[in-house]
Image: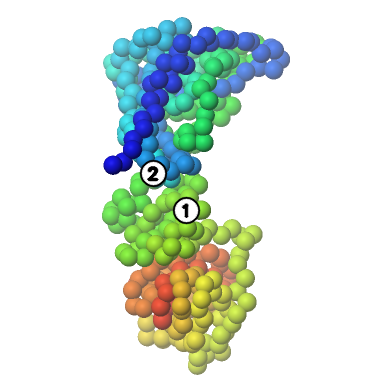
Amino acid sequence: MMKMKTLHLSIIFVSLLSITIINTNLPAAQGISGPAYFMKSNSTAKIYANFAISVLNNQSWDIKPEILTSLDDFSTKPPGLTIDAQPSSFIKNMHHVHVTYTITAKGNTKGVYPLFLFSCGTSPLVVGLDESEVSPAIYNKFFTAAYACPAVSTGTPDMNIIGYSGIISKILTIDSNNTITVTSVSKLGEPPQSPLKQFKSGIQAKNVTCTQGLELIFKFEDSSPACVRQQTAQTLVEHGWGMWVPAVTEQDIPNVPSSIKVANTNFTINYNIVGNGKILDARMDAQSKSLILSLETTSNGTLTVSIPRALLDIKKNDRGSGEFYVLADGQETIFKEIHTTPTYRIFSIPFQNGTKNVEIIATELI
């Protein structure tokens, strides 16, 4: 029987509300800064968060966001404002959980309200007003408040906000003359859909987008995509669950020290294989305009191959520039073009144990 232990954030929040909030003004010359959220009256806003879980277990975690009347009244909630979180709880047996906070401002609701999302402290939620319509003293009270926060353990999830819709996050600075300046505005929009939703909507697996900090990995069984941390991706690949093409920067182009001549041509391709494998033969298929590589593999791995553009390329015409496709033993597989120069392209192609042929196809738009 699974043992469940629920950690109630509402209890933490009650503790937070029962403490004394101390406001200390900073020296006038130094000024004060802090974040504030802005949304319109009679509207709905969403804040998207990622909860990273470092200690996996079967405990459940409740999420209890709150909007309160004011910093002087933590016992009541303002009429016309609601907030909820979906999911409202989760089991800590996954590395990442995405949570969507939905804030609804009904009617002509206007004002500045304490917004509590997670763990400790509040931020000003400004509804129906812009920053210049709020007294600097109100911001000052939020930005200089001190909270006696509960201790955070290694099992406490780490929350990062990854997107917004219908709401704007601004960093405000108040100088010695009580002048409010917007020093930055969040550029976060809505985060990408889940990898599976993107895939089912018709986006090719290789073009699925992950949120910042996550890596795209593909399940061997059906090439379906998933977004995970880099360390998790490495573990899944090592255990044979899927394929992963690590992100590569221009400063970190992999070496391709081995080479093989392409049969019946004057070209040679350079390559490298991570894992147990080697290229036995390379040849061009003029009819399908593809490069066919015969492999010998005894483990999962990744083939990195540098192909001269004079041998195989896609050329732009009035309809576009075509696409590359990669087949592994006749089945379309994932790959990534990791570097391009005027003379060659470098592809990274993960493969499964036992793969015998990799075919790189250049298609033209006609």
Looking at the image, can residue 202 be seen? Answer: yes
Q: Is residue 85 above or below residue 143?
A: below
Quarter of the picture holding the N terminus: top left
Q: Which residue lies at the image location 47% right of the left edge and 53% below the top edge?
A: 232
Q: Which residue lies at the image location 58% right of the left edge and 78% below the top edge?
A: 270
What residue occupies the far bottom of the structure in this picture? 264
Looking at the image, can residue 160 be seen? Answer: no
> Can you identify the residue that label 1 sits on?
232
State the image quarter where residue 343 is shown. Answer: bottom right
User: Disc 2 marks which amino acid?
Assistant: Asn
Q: Position of residue 286 (x, y in %)?
A: 41, 86
Q: Earlier in the sequence, mark 1 or mark 2?
A: 2
**Number of the label disc, if any, that sits on residue 349:** none
Q: Is residue 288 above or below residue 46?
A: below
State the image quarter where residue 125 is shown. Answer: top left
Q: Who is closer to the viewer here, 182 or 263?
A: 263
> Can you identify the residue that label 2 sits on?
93
Q: Position of residue 71 (x, y in %)?
A: 47, 10
Q: How is the image coloured?
A: rainbow
Q: Who is closer to the viewer here, 198 or 71?
A: 71
Q: Which residue lies at the image location 35% right of the left edge and 71% below the top edge?
A: 332
Q: Nearer the viewer, mark 1 or mark 2?
A: 2
